[in-house]
Image (cartoon, grey):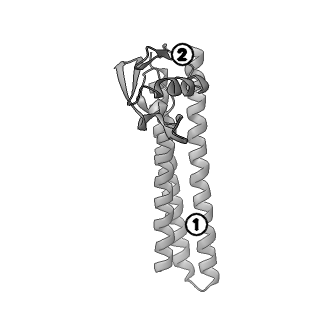
């Protein structure tokens, strides 16, 4: 029974991590409002190592559509500008020598629909991951059955795994619905 509970706890923890990861990925999808988290994936060359922009500068909202990046070292301004130009943010950085401004235009209807598609894809990736966790956990439970674990305990555990899976997939659907409303809001 202890092993069964271990696998159930492990499955639940893995599914929670999948939800967190999906939320992080969705936070990178711009929904019309400029957010510092949009720059989370961007790195710059900082004395020979790839370092996130947020670790070499402060990133603040000037207003709902403008981010201001103020590097702690003046030499990093051009490095940050290059990283932004290479990224897929779709904005042109404005460098004034001390800081960089990013002005995000309001997304067009077509762009919003593409962002919704992107969000749906991220949520689908999360669902696939949760289903994979379910499959792996059920495989481990079947091994326990072959090793002599009681069949009714395994069946109960498989039911619990399915319940966990259903709950986490519902949670992802709720997250997607919320993100879709956020994206489509003008």
Q: Position of residue 147 (x, y in %)?
A: 62, 85
Dots 1 and 2: beta carbons under 8 Å? no
Figure check: 136 above or below 77: below
Q: Is 98 in front, or is 23?
A: 98
- Identify the residue shown where x is 45% and y is 66%: 9
Quadrant assignment for the C terminus: top left
Determine which residue is flagged by label 1.
137
Figure check: 40 above or below 105: below
Figure check: 161 above or below 20: below
Q: Earlier in the sequence, mark 1 or mark 2?
A: 2
Q: Position of residue 34 (x, y in %)?
A: 43, 23
Q: Say what secondary structure mark 1 lies in.
A: helix
Q: Say what secondary structure mark 2 lies in.
A: loop
Q: Position of residue 20 (x, y in %)?
A: 46, 47
Crowding at label 1, few (<14), some or many (≥20) Cα neighbours within 10 Å? many
Determine which residue is flagged by label 2.
92
* Distance from Cα at disc 1 to Cα at disc 2: 47 Å
Direction from residue 63 to residue 166 in the image, left or right: right
Q: Is 41 in front, or is 135?
A: 41
Q: Position of residue 24 (x, y in %)?
A: 47, 41
Farthest residue toward the bottom? 148
Figure check: 169 above or below 64: below
Count of numbered marks? 2
- Identify the residue shown where x is 46% and y is 27%: 75
Direction from residue 68 to residue 1 in the image, left or right: right
């Amino acid at each position: 029974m202890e092993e069964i509970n271990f696998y159930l706890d492990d499955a639940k923890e893995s599914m929670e991590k999948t939800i967190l990861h999906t939320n992080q990925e969705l936070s990178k999808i711009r929904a019309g409002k400029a957010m510092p988290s949009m720059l989370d994936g961007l790195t710059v060359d900082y004395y020979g190592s790839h370092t996130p922009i947020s670790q070499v500068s402060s990133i603040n909202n000037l207003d709902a559509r403008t981010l201001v990046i103020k590097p702690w070292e003046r030499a990093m301004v051009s490095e940050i500008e290059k990283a932004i130009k290479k990224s897929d943010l779709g904005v042109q950085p404005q460098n004034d020598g001390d800081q960089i401004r990013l002005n995000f235009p309001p997304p067009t209807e077509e762009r919003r629909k593409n962002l919704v598609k992107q969000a749906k894809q991220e949520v689908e990736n999360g669902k696939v991951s949760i289903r994979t966790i379910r499959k792996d956990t059920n495989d481990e439970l079947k091994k326990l059955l072959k090793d002599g674990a009681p069949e009714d305990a395994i069946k109960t555990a498989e039911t619990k795994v399915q319940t966990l899976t259903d709950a986490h997939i519902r949670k992802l659907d709720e997250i997607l619905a919320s993100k879709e409303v956020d994206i489509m809001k003008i």
